[in-house]
Image (tube, helix red, strand yellow):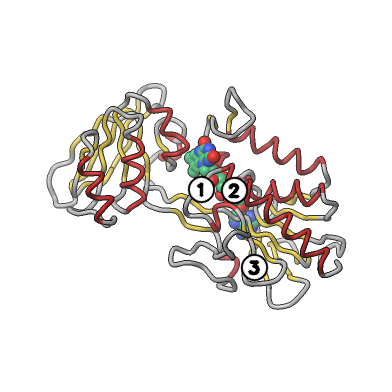
Amino acid sequence: MSASPDFKAIIIGSGPAGLTAAIYLSRANVPNLLFEGQQPGGQLTITTEVENFPGFPEGITGPELMLKLRAQAERFGTVIRGETVESVDLSAQPYTVRTGEGQYAAPVVIIASGSTARWLHLQDEEKFHGKGLSACATCDGFFFRGQEIAVVGGGDTALEEAIYLTNFASKVTLIHRRGEFRGSKIMQERALANPKIEVAWNSIPKQYQADDKGNLTGLVLQDTTGGPDRQLPVTGCFIAIGHTPNTAFLNGQLPTDESGYLVTVPGTTSVSRPGVYACGDVQDHVYRQAITSAGTGCMAAIEAERWLAGVGH
Ligand SMILES: Cc1cc2nc3c(=O)[nH]c(=O)nc-3n(C[C@H](O)[C@H](O)[C@H](O)COP(=O)(O)OP(=O)(O)OC[C@H]3O[C@@H](n4cnc5c(N)ncnc54)[C@H](O)[C@@H]3O)c2cc1C
């Protein structure tokens, strides 16, 4: 085992949840080891401006914010490794965590592995991140004041995001692959009654279009019933086809809800094993924000520290 027995907690994930848990554990003198995974810094590293994280009145870029959180955790003693967790064994104490490079053990495991937004996987999609393409209306809606934009999806989240985005956009086109929505009746009624919302039924985006600076200028829509393609001029496009919580390495050892999110005891970050906590987007399908992830990361660390003290570790 490559573990130092001195680690009392292992944190899986380096987004706002994991790094906040690390800061709190280190400042509580709980030796902790954090695995960064394949996306060091988490989801915020693929966005540009973050204007809603408290404490940055001028805004801050996502990568810069995450470097600051990382430096803060390291300053207080968190050991950070650029490894990805392949499996964990939560059947006996101390829990073991296996990465491609070794096996580690600790009485506490904090799962902060986040979730992955589902994208359309069209050509050059990643080049449009921060240039008109987003997966988070709460985060980015404000940037599209007075503009014509699109939302892709047909479930409740897509309908909710489209309605929310009418607070900013001059027009929102909801693009849905079928001829009717999957979302609840009440959300459908609200969306369809909104004068700023238009629906592109039986349509899927086929291509992103850009100006010479790479900013989104439109979408080419394919008709799913076999009609001709058409062009939709928009400067923003929000993909609202769901998120996948990153839990494969748990191999079904912890309960999840029907969408795959880890289930925590209400009002806590505790899961169904003593000393195991889940925080951030991996257990939150409602808020999905950096600040709420950081908040639950803080909760996980405090709960872990109290549990360790209670069992005499
Ligand atoms: C394009 C975009 C823009 C956004 N803009 C904003 C914004 O402006 N404001 C805002 O508040 N929120 C924003 N969000 C949402 C915000 O990024 C998330 O809510 C937040 O990052 C979730 O934090 P987290 O720590 O739970 O997980 P994540 O940020 O998803 O991080 C998960 C971490 O877990 C790691 N990981 C996963 N699996 C493993 C494994 N097997 N082993 C080890 N590590 C693993 C990953 O490498 C990553 O480091 C945005 C999201 C997106 C996609």
Mark 2: is the Cβ under 8 angstroms from ligand 1? yes
Residue at the disc numbered 1:
288
Residue name at image x 32 percent, y 31 percent: 209
Mark 3: is the Cβ under 8 angstroms from ligand 1? no
Which residue in the rendered view is the most extreme toward the bottom? 91
In-image side of 26 versus 70 (left or right): right
| Relative height, residue 94 to residue 60 (above, below) | below
Image location of residue 255, percent across then percent down: 54, 71
Image location of residue 141, percent across then percent down: 41, 33
Q: Amino acid at mark 3?
A: Ser
Give the numbered dot on residue 87.
Answer: 3
- The answer to whether one can see residue 241 in this image is yes
Which residue in the rendered view is the most extreme toward the front? 267
* Tags 1 and 2 touching, CB below 8 Å: yes
In-image side of 182 versus 15 (left or right): left
Residue name at image x 48 percent, y 64 percent: 260
Q: Amino acid at mark 1?
A: Arg
Q: Earlier in the sequence, mark 1 or mark 3?
A: 3
> Observer-nearest residue: 300 or 76?
300
Q: Secondary structure at mark 1?
A: loop
